[in-house]
């Protein structure tokens, strides 16, 4: 695939809203310092749940972030994050759709599950259940039933896509994907492919999610996937540590602006990195379990390297999926060791920034792709925080203690989802492109 | 988009909807002019403003015999798994794999992709929490405390939007490129477009594309009705008296592969993928551009991708959902491209309702059948074409396609328009 003449794609804009900062630079500074975004959940009463901690976005002003009042009315919490992050990315790139080229702009998003707001479900409960709480459809026909079509619209699977295309006037190819925790990575991979085949000249690509609400967190509590270190929220997410015991649920959004390389050069744009390769596989193993031997993630990483035309010797940083669950981290390490047998123990720097931000689910892959671009820009790998006890299965070259400086020729971002979808992306340092 | 040196063909299809659980049965409904839309049974609709839908009538275990699997999937997943596995079976790709020496089978699996368009989820899945709210007397603290006593630990797994991708992948060991598209109505048809693009891009040798949805549920009916989008009888696309759409439920699937490989293994070829167009009207979640802008551009992109001119097209399977605004703007967009030389147009939602996430891919499967039979079924519920659409070539009776090339149009929330160009 790499031998084929293909269009080169540049990353020229980044926007982030995360539990460690409501902008790109704020988030990036926190990740380099290994600052945790986790704490006791404050946005609702989580005191009765088995997990009471999460990594919430803090101090986010919806009204300020999304000036269009009508659009904001239709926006869920995660949609508002998305609109804000996308606006930052476009402003950063210094380019936006104009009427004459809006049809050549595209959008791909990794969107979260259609998680209903507890308050909306409470309304259904109060009007349309019997005395035992079982649903009774006719209750909705009560003339006082306050069900609101606007809330319904928020729930539609592509509502985020609809709001983003409208806000920024994007009239070309547009799609929305959901492969659980791999969504954000797959959305960026889909954008790369759409641009290479000439479908768009510029794209906004990213992900957004917020499951930090009673219904969202319930699903994970029931599965036992979350860390229950309720007394130690900032240390709960400890990817690759021997005592890791689940992930910390985060929320947020991340967007990249992608451009045809030549067009970006022509307008003198600042290029963070080349989005050089995408790999995408299905483990086809079990729904929540990861294959212990890394079969599945291995193919995704190899494909991404092959697609990018980057050798295993050129990867200087891996932003691991690293959720901090026993199985995921072991499976991912097995895959990294299989692909980089000679370099993974000492020369490739590896970190999971979920140690600071928590797990942003459908947004994770997009935010972490942005982290790879920033690491390349500043020649520094962010910290794998909270690592204490060594796990022999996870003996990779983790960035511990402090951010590790050093030039990065190419970086890899892994996203491995529930259901077995694996996404790997390769970013190349722009200096390596001209070289 | 297109890589002219390689032809991509369909070698298997599967479908289930209110009109039947295979292509033949559904074709017979389309040909008969008798809609499958009728009174629904999933809840008592007596007091409801909308009393009809096109429900799938097959028994759950007929569609997916594995009893254990039903514990971890929802209704929509059941349709998707059924349709995808029917398409896989018809295509013979797994039989081809199983005939390979064992050491070649892993490589085959890695080069076999699976792309699913999913409705994304159901409101009803959240009703599992309603008894818990009662138990907790509306207190969140008690809701959290009692959670694991009231709700199944499998709740999240049952409701993952990407369940069909997971289960079909595991059951068939399809390990190559994959995606789960959650783009409302456009989900299923985009799965087909992305599959063809991925094969052209060299990411896979063959891909199973599927779309599934079960939009028919109380909250969907309630809100669609409130928004003025629902009819209380079978939809009448392009009719002067059309008053809205009606939900169906179901799934459809096609297997795409390189023509060369399909021929080499002697597979039955159902048709060829020629190209596609996809664009947004940037009008927000619900609104439509009054000038048919997105329809026009998506058709033009598809023709361009397929290297066809408007006069090459022999039939159009329209989105035709039966709502006043969508049908009118769709006809305007079509006219912008074809002028006064519009090929025969039909649509199938009058027969099996609106399958939302599965609608476009179901229409594709039935369009391939129409091309094969050289017969374009009429719109059974059509009485008088809306004069606001000018001389628009839709009819209640069947006609012959003018050529072997067809367009399938799919529109959705978010201002989405997707058009496929195919031929037999």
Image (tube, helix red, strand yellow):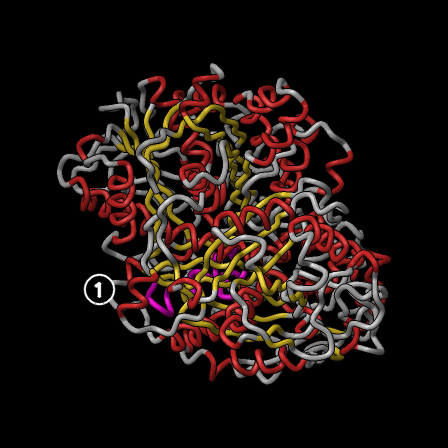
Residue at the extreme left of the image, as rendered: B340
Note whether A349 is above or below A22 in the view shown: above
Note whether A216 is above or below A77 in the view shown: above
Q: Which residue is mark 1?
A: A100
Q: Position of residue B263 (x, y in %)?
A: 43, 18
At 26% from the left and 20% from the top, the residue drawn is: B400
Residue A221 seen: yes
From the viewer's perspective, tell me whether residue A384 is left or right of residue B84. right
Q: Position of residue A158 (x, y in %)?
A: 48, 57
Residue B301 found in image quarter: top left
At 49% from the left and 29% from the top, the residue drawn is: B255
At 32% from the left and 50% from the top, the residue drawn is: A198
Identify which residue, A307 or A139, lies in the foreground: A307
Q: In the rendered view of the protein, which quadrant contains the N terminus of chain B?
A: top left
From the viewer's perspective, tell me whether residue B8 is left or right of residue A20. left
Name the chain letter of the residue that bears numbered label 1: A
Q: In the rendered view of the protein, which quadrant contains the C terminus of chain B?
A: top left
Q: Classify mark 1: helix, strand or loop.
A: loop
Residue A152 highlighted magenta (yes or no)? yes
Identify which residue, A103 or A119, lies in the foreground: A103
Q: Position of residue B114 (x, y in %)?
A: 55, 38
Identify which residue, B386 or B270, lies in the foreground: B270
Residue A214 found in image quarter: bottom right
Most frequent secondary structure within the magenta stretch: helix
Q: Position of residue A100 (x, y in %)?
A: 22, 64
Residue B362 highlighted magenta (yes or no)? no
From the viewer's perspective, tell me whether residue A283 is left or right of residue A167. right
Please report the bounds of the magenta region as a residue range. A150-171
Identify which residue, B100 or B208, lies in the foreground: B100
């Amino acid at each position: 695939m790499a031998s084929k003449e293909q269009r080169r794609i540049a990353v020229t804009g980044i926007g982030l809203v995360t539990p460690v900062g409501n902008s790109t630079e704020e988030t990036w500074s926190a990740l380099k310092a290994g600052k945790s975004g986790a704490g006791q959940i404050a946005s609702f009463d989580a005191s009765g749940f088995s997990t009471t901690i999460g990594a919430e976005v803090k101090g986010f002003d919806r009204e300020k972030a999304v000036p269009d009042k009508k659009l904001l009315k239709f926006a869920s919490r995660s949609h508002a994050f998305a609109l804000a992050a996308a606006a930052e990315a476009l402003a950063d790139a210094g380019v936006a759709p104009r009427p004459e080229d809006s049809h050549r702009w595209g959008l791909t998003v990794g969107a979260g599950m259609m998680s209903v707001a507890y308050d909306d479900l409470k309304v259904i409960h109060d009007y349309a259940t019997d005395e035992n709480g079982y649903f009774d459809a006719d209750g909705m026909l009560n003339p006082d039933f306050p069900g609101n079509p606007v809330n319904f619209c928020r729930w539609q699977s592509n509502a985020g896509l609809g709001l983003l295309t409208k806000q920024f006037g994007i009239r070309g190819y547009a799609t929305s994907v959901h492969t659980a925790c791999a969504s954000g990575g797959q959305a960026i991979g889909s954008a790369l492919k759409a641009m290479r085949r000439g479908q768009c000249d510029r794209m906004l690509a990213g992900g957004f999610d917020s499951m930090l609400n009673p219904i969202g967190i319930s699903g994970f509590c029931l599965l036992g996937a979350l860390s229950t270190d309720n007394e130690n929220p900032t240390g709960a997410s400890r990817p690759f540590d021997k005592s890791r015991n689940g992930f910390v649920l985060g929320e947020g959004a991340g967007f990249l602006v992608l451009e045809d390389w030549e067009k970006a050069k022509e307008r003198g744009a600042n290029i963070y990195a080349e989005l050089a390769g995408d790999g995408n596989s299905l483990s086809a193993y079990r729904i929540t379990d990861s294959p212990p031997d890394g079969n599945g993630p291995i193919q995704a990483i190899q494909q991404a390297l092959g697609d990018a035309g980057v050798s295993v010797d050129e990867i200087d940083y891996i932003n691991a999926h690293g959720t901090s669950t026993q199985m995921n981290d072991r499976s991912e390490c097995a895959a990294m060791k299989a692909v980089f047998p000679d370099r993974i123990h000492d020369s490739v720097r590896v970190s999971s920034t979920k140690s600071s931000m928590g797990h942003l689910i459908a947004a994770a892959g997009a935010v972490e792709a942005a982290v790879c671009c920033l690491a390349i820009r500043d020649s520094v790998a962010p910290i794998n925080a909270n690592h204490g006890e060594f796990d022999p299965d996870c003996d990779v070259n983790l960035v511990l203690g402090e951010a590790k400086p050093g030039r990065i020729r190419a970086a890899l971002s892994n996203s491995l989802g529930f259901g077995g979808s694996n996404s790997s992306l390769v970013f190349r340092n722009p200096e390596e492109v001209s070289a | 988009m297109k890589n002219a040196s390689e032809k991509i063909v369909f070698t298997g299809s599967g479908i289930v909807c209110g009109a039947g659980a295979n292509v033949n049965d559904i074709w017979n409904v389309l040909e008969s002019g008798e809609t499958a839309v009728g009174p629904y049974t999933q809840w008592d609709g007596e007091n409801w403003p909308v009393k009809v839908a096109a429900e799938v009538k097959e028994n759950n275990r007929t569609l997916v015999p594995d009893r254990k699997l039903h514990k971890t999937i929802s209704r929509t997943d059941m349709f998707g798994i059924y349709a995808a596995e029917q398409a896989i079976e018809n295509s013979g790709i797994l039989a081809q794999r199983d005939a390979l020496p064992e050491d070649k089978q892993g490589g085959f699996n890695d080069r076999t992709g699976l792309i699913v368009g999913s409705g994304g989820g159901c409101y009803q899945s959240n009703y599992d929490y309603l008894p818990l709210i009662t138990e907790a007397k509306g207190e969140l603290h008690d809701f959290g405390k009692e959670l694991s006593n009231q709700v199944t630990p499998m709740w999240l797994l049952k409701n993952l939007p990407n369940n069909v991708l997971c289960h079909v992948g595991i059951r068939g060991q399809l390990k190559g490129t994959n995606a789960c598209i959650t783009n409302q109505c456009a989900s299923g048809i985009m799965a087909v477009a992305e599959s063809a693009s991925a094969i052209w891009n060299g990411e896979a040798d063959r891909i199973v594309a599927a779309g599934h949805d079960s939009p028919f549920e109380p909250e969907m009916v309630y809100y669609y009705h409130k928004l003025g989008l629902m009819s209380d009888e079978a939809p009448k696309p392009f009719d002067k008296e059309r008053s809205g759409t009606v939900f169906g439920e179901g799934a459809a699937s096609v297997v795409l592969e390189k023509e060369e490989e399909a021929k080499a293994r002697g597979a039955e070829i159902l048709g060829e993928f020629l190209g596609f167009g996809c664009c947004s009207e940037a009008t927000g979640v619900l609104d439509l551009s009054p000038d048919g802008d997105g329809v026009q551009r998506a058709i033009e992109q598809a023709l361009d991708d397929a290297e066809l001119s408007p006069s090459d097209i022999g039939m159009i399977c329209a989105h035709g959902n039966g709502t006043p605004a969508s049908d009118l703007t769709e006809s305007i967009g079509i006219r912008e491209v074809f002028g006064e030389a519009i090929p025969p147009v039909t649509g199938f939602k009058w027969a099996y309702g609106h399958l939302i996430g599965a609608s476009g891919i179901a229409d594709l499967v039935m369009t391939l059948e129409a091309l094969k039979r050289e017969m374009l079924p009429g719109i059974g519920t059509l009485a008088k074409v809306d004069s606001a659409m000018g001389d628009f070539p839709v009819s209640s009776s069947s006609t012959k396609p003018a050529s072997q090339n067809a367009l399938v149009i799919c529109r959705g929330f978010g201002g989405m328009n997707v058009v496929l160009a195919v031929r037999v």
